[in-house]
Image (cartoon, rainbow, N blue to C red):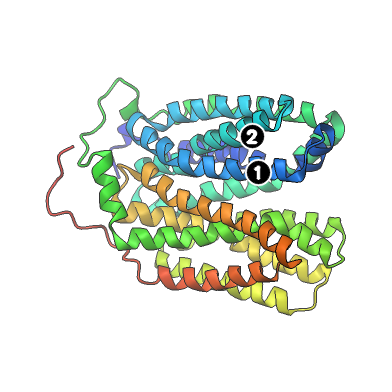
Amino acid sequence: MPNTQKTLSIAQVLVCGGLIVTLSMGIRHGFGLWLQPITQAQGWTRETFAFAIAIQNLAWGVSGIFAGMLADRFGAFKVIVTGALMYALGLVGMAHSPTPLLFTLSAGVLIGMAQAGTTYAVVYGVIGRNVAADKRSWAMGIAAAAGSFGQFLMVPTEGFLIGRFGWQEALVMLGAAALLMLPLSLWLREPGFTGNTRPARREQSIGQAFREAIKYPSFQLLMAGYFVCGFQVVFIGVHMPSYLKDKGLSPEVAGYALALIGLFNVFGTYIAGTMGQRLSKKKILAFIYFARAVVISVFLWAPLSPLSVYIFAALIGLLWLSTVPATNSLVAQIFGVQHLSMLSGFVFFSHQIGSFLGVWLGGYLYDRTGSYDIVWLIAIALGVFAGLVNLPVKETAITRTAPVAG
């Protein structure tokens, strides 16, 4: 581990980084609660709202690459501060956008960019630089569990705020809550990026690190697996309530199911991060994807009832974001931590392409076939595919013949 005088303490990184991820991820998980209030108040279609959220996912993915580059170069502190300010501005913009275009710019573009600077890629870069390799997977599991807890905590909180104060005031209150990330980011100011000391000389430039990774087969396989992760979780998260309603179950069942996913996700991500310290990370990832395919298959095959939905939600919750610590710690293990935020951003971009396709294809095929059956089958097939492509990943550090000037 690097000299302790030049790194942040593990507790400092985990507490502050975890709280930032809790706020950022927790707020975004509740956006679906605003679909009906906003569309009814503004006279917009649901497609208008859904398009803005789809753009948010793409903006998050694209911006994540550049947020990672900036965090690797200038430190996470400045990126998180910028992201928190954009988050607050975007939420206020959501509350007061009079047209679909302005709503898409605020809820979609601005908040998507804000999430890129306040979630996993940037926080994982801090973890990678300040936590020893033998504890890194565990630490990333803690951060991922914080994001999961944010979903469990913030979704009912946001529902309460909407019911008590109205949808516009609730968004403004969340904007104020997003500003809490500003003081938290102060504790993530890394000594090498403060201006008081010069950062260590880099072995690679950004371009060299990117070219090395993008040509490396194991990096390509990790990106393919993460694409599947995005497809599955966003399709289930967005379309499962409608699927259950089509099958005659009450909206309360879907609400409880989503809460169970968030709750069990906390345990799943922590367990996956802890296991990554002792077991092969690629085998953990393969197991998660294979298990998702099995769980979805059994869910579709078994007679549908509230009990079967809750069992499915608990099991899929354990597998929900458990891919996050294993995938990102593998990137650090293979390529090192100098450009970890950027490389994590590229992997996450693949995840967000999958997210976009999962939410869009679900609606597209439903409109044309009258059911979600085809998309469920695609999700199962992709789970098998992702499990298979993770098995050949090489977990050893990449061999560089000589230091690269940069």
Quadrant assignment for the C terminus = top left
Q: Secondary structure at mark 2?
A: helix
The image quadrant that residue 218 belongs to is bottom left
Pick the front one: 101 or 391: 101
Instruction: Answer with left or right where residue 195 lies relative to residue 383.
Output: left
- Relative placement, left or right, of 268 versus 66 is right
Q: Secondary structure at mark 1?
A: helix
Quadrant containing the N terminus is top left
Residue 280: x and y in percent read: 39, 67
Image location (x, y in percent) of residue 54: 61, 45
Residue topped by disc 2: 104
Q: Is residue 225 above or below residue 385?
A: above
- Residue 275 in view (yes/no): yes
Classify mark 1: residues with Cα within 10 Å, few (<14), some (14-19) or many (20+): some
Q: Which residue is mark 1?
A: 51
Q: Nearer the viewer, residue 34 or 314?
A: 34
The quadrant where residue 32 appears: top right
The residue drawn where x is 43% and y is 26% is: 78
Q: CA distance from mark 1 to mark 2?
A: 8 Å
Q: Amino acid at mark 2?
A: Thr
Res. 241 image quadrant: bottom right
Question: Tag count in the figure?
Answer: 2
Q: Earlier in the sequence, mark 1 or mark 2?
A: 1
Callouts 1 and 2 close, C-beta under 8 Å: yes
